Every structure is written in structure tokens, then in C-alpha cells.
Image: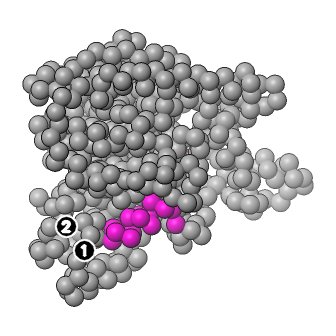
Amino acid sequence: MENLSALSIPDINCLIKKGDIKVHELLDKAYKTIEQSSLNTFITLLKEESYKKADDIHLRIKNGEDIDILTGIPIAIKDNICIKGHRTTCSSRMLDNYVSPYTATVVERLENKGAIIIGKTNLDEFAMGASTETSFYKPTKNPYKHEYVPGGSSGGSAAAVAGLETVAALGSDTGGSIRQPASFCGVFGLKPTYGRVSRYGLVAFASSLDCIGPITNNVADSAILLETIAGPDSMDSTSIPEDVPRYYDMLTNEINNVTIGIVRGQLMDIIDKDVADVMEDFIKGLKFTGITLKDVTIEGFDICIPVYYIIATSEASSNLARYDGIRYGWIGNTKYDTLNEMYEVRRGVGFGKEVKRRIMLGTFCLRSGYKDQYYDKAIMVREKIRMSFEKALKDVDVLLLPTSPTLPFKIGEKIDDPVSMYLMDLCTVSISLSGLPAMSIPVGYQKGLPVGLQIVGRRLEEGTILKICHFLEKNGLASSNIENL
């Protein structure tokens, strides 16, 4: 295949070891594709640093040193994940010139294995959005149809992978921000169990929900990346102190007596027909695999959106209070007569419309006399949603439901309708509220646009999800079909 980024990580590793390709060739092709692209996926490219690392890797190989499976692999990083000495903008004017003084744990773990970070990708401002349209650096385009959105907030990462600008990418998922853009761009997107991957170095949106995970063109690459970035971290008190399984090795294990719970009822009543039709075709294919199917009803989809947005905006209001133009943030050239005027101008100009909307919502929910009516009550309902999912997963190995309630929509179509945009998270936020792992897999197309479905597993059972998704991929039921681009 002409574009080396279309190959899997194990295949690229094999070619590098045999001497059939050099790391420099991988970088040349990646950067050439990015420079010729009109998708607007990257905010910052790390070309000079990348080629220096390629030189070091070439010397190691020349000296006969063994290399890791990730050595020399180009990886893109969402621009709300810190890399020391480079800008971390969160796609906001507020952090346009911010240079991080430290590196995120996930980046350190990738670089320790020899991966090359080629650049930082576009996103919705401070990861708040479902289309990558709220970015200060203009929207990213969908690789399949450029007039459509790639999803969000990790739209840059998903579009870069689908557009073969990188072999793989990392995104962050608060309420669906890895899974929904993976669905819209026709690639694989994995949200781990909350705490499975360190959040150290991820700019906080909603601290009790934020997760980092991989976006790839195949399941094997997702397994390799998750195995690398997962695990406890002394710098993150919310990271889970559990050993990391060998996810990649687990893919070859046989799947026996697997039961998939098909989520029906309330949710499917509000899913667009285009998505529902693809899901029904996928279920028909499942029936020939030997996997047992069972209809499952889960309560809470009617309340998950308000619960999520109360919790997420409340935490965002607290986390973004630090961006005041004094400690962090945009300063501007205006002279101010009062401290309040300075705050109003710097935060008013530094933040975009959607971020300001969420800060105001969150501040309202936390104000004196309202916190117990909104935030505290939302936390109680969140626990009921989590218990509903755990109950459903007692009788099945994983759950199946749509990733997005609709197909990708046109750029500009929903940006002025925040409620409509918030409803794009309908299928994903309940899983985030439950802290469970889930993977969006590409399963079909409607009107020339990709459709993804989610495989949801029990807490810390990413290995089960990956193993089942790999089986589905091998049997032709899930595929990025990148040759269709």
C-alpha cells in the first residue's frame, strides 16, 4: 500500500527490522500527507525533533540493537496533552502561547518505547464540543466528506488517523470525545476504564470523567497503545493501582461462549433511522459468528444528558478558574482601570462562546443554595446509572449500542444550537458517567459517511473488549476501510 500510515504497527515494525523501510521514510510520508491535506488536523508539528529521533533510531538499528514494537512509529497527540517545551493550546486563544514545562505520563511512556510524536492535533476548545468547530484554529474537516464535521472533541486526532496523516493518535474522552469522532471518521476509538490511564499532563475539563485513549485504524494498534500508556502513576492519585494485562497477546486467544447484550428499548427509540439500519445489519452478521445475542434494556438514557452536563460543567467551572490572564492565559494589550474589568476582558476574549457557556452553567450549579439541588443530586443519579450498567453486564460479557445517535452533520449545521449539539453525546455520556471502558468500531456506511457502534465492557475488562473487537474485525464485521477514502 502506497501510504505507510495505512499499515498496522506490527507490520511497520516488521518492515523496519528487516530494513525494508526506514523511520525517515515513515516521517517523510506522514509530513507530506499532512502538508498536502486540507483537513486542518494539526495545530503544531514537531518535525525537527521527530527527525532527530529518527536519526537516533537509525543508528541503533545499524548497530544491531533490538527495538520495541513502537520504535519509530509516528503518533499524533491531542493538543490538550502536555509535551515539555512545546505549546499546549487546548485550541483556545486563552492558551495560544502557553508552553508546557512538563510532559504528560502517556507521552513519556510512548517515547520510552521509541514512538515518535509528530505533532499535536486540533480539538474543540478545552475539549468542549462534539464537532471540533469550537476550535480557535478553525474546524477540522471529515476525511470522507470535507463539508461535514469529524466529530469532537478529538476530531483532529480521529481525522488524522482516518486521513492517513499518522499511524495512530491519542485523544481524550470526557463524555464521548474519543468514541464519537472515531465513529464519524470510520476508525477505532477506545475509552479505557476511568483511572486505567494516567491523567497527569492532560489539561483538565471534568476531572471525574476525563480519560486518555487511542484512536487507530485497527484493533491490534489500539491494544499495543493501551498496553503502553496504561498503568498506575504516582503523579495521578486517581490512577488505578492494578497491573496492566498483555492486551496485544490476548488478541490471539479464542473467544468461547461470548454473549453480547444488544441495548434496545428506550435508547433505540431516539436513534436516527440511518444509524439504526446499520446496527440491525451488523446484528444480522453477528448471528453467523457463534456469538450469543441477548436483548438488554438499560434505564437512564433519558436523564444522562442533564446529569452529565451538570457534573461536567460544574467541574469545568472549577478547573478553568485558573485561566485569568495572571497565573495562566491570554493577556492582550488593554490597560485596565479595575481588577474586575481585567478579568472580564481577559476571560471574555480569551475563551470562546461554548467554553463561556459551560463555565456559566457550572458556576450556576455550584453557587450557594443551588449545589444541593443540582450537583449533589446529579452525583446521586450518576450512581444509579452506573448500577444500571453493572446490572446489565452481569448476564452478558459486553454491551452493544450506537456510538452516535446520528450520522456526521455538516459544518455549521448545529453550532448555533447548543442543545442539539449536546444531544450528540446521548449514547456515550452514560458510559462515561459509569466509568466503564468502551470501544467504538466502524461497522458500515450510510450516504457515504461512516457509522460506528460501541462495545462496552465491565470495569478494567478492556482485554475482553479488544479480544471481541479483534474477532469481529477478522470476520469482516468491523473495518476502518481506509481504502474507501
Residue ID at (49%, 18%): 300
Q: Is residue 454 above or below residue 57?
A: above
Residue closer to the observer: 144 or 472:
472
Residue ID at (15%, 61%): 11
Q: In what element is the residue under mark 1?
A: loop
Q: Is residue 3 left or right of residue 103?
A: left
Residue ID at (36%, 24%): 394
Q: Is residue 442 left or right of residue 118?
A: left
Q: Is residue 435 left or right of residue 373?
A: left
How far across and how far down the image is residue 128, in percent?
54, 41
Q: Which residue is mark 1?
A: 67
**Comes first in the chain, label 2 or label 1:** 2
| Residue range corresponding to the magenta coloring | 103-125
Residue ID at (78%, 46%): 344
> Is-magenta flag for residue 123?
yes
How far across and how far down the image is residue 203, in percent?
57, 53
Quadrant placement of the N terminus:
bottom left
Q: Which residue is mark 2?
A: 13
Q: How is the image coloured?
A: one colour
How far across and how far down the image is residue 129, in percent?
51, 38
